[in-house]
Amino acid sequence: MSGAGNKRLARALATLGAGALFGFGLSVSGMIRPEVVLSFLHFQDFGLMLVMGGAVVVVLLSYQLAPRLLRRPLLDDHFHAHPSVWNRDTAVGAALFGLGWGLCGVCPGPAIAGLGAGNFSLLWALAGIALGALVQGLSAKPR
């Protein structure tokens, strides 16, 4: 296998491992159960605040410290900037996402992880997410 092939395999395995760790964390935290998420959103259970706060801290530290401690990422040639642009479409999308999350207690990552745990009723939520993504894609203005 060539050097490029080895790098692709390493990236694929790292992605698979990160996804499995993410899904496991969502499962252990209870985020794959819509009733747990809804009790958090109804201010009845604040356990998920610790989960989300912990995730924010890990990401913040990673984005701030990794470029300072490493000359380059382990599986890439350089660190990439992740610019964020706020506009009307972003605000509307965020509001719709929040509304859907508040109504059914499901967002995409936990829904997929929940399927892995055998909660197939989450297919309805994933169908709605896919439909929303399709509508957005069809109505998006070309850049």
Image (spheres, rainbow, N blue to C red):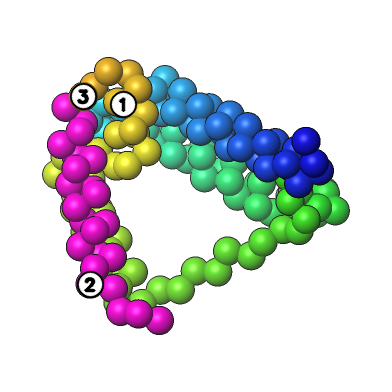
Say which residue label 2 marks: 139
Q: Position of residue 117 (x, y in %)?
A: 32, 18
Q: CA distance from mark 3 to mark 2?
A: 30 Å
Mark 3, residue position: 120
Give the amino acid at mark 2: Ser
> Dot 2: what SS?
helix
Whether residue 39 appears in this view of the structure is no
Can I make out residue 136 in this image?
yes
The overriding secondary structure of the stretch rendered in magenta is helix
**98 in magenta:** no
On the rendered structure, is 65 left or right of 124?
A: right
Rounded to the nearest whole Å, what is the CA distance between mark 1 and mark 2? Answer: 30 Å
- Picture coordinates of residue 78, whole percent (x, y): 76, 58
Image quadrant containing the C terminus: bottom left
- At 19% from the left edge and 52% from the top edge, which residue is drawn? 131
Q: How many marks?
A: 3
Q: Name the residue located 82 percent from the left edge and 49 percent from the top edge.
A: 70
Q: Tell me the amino acid under the disc marked 1.
A: Gly
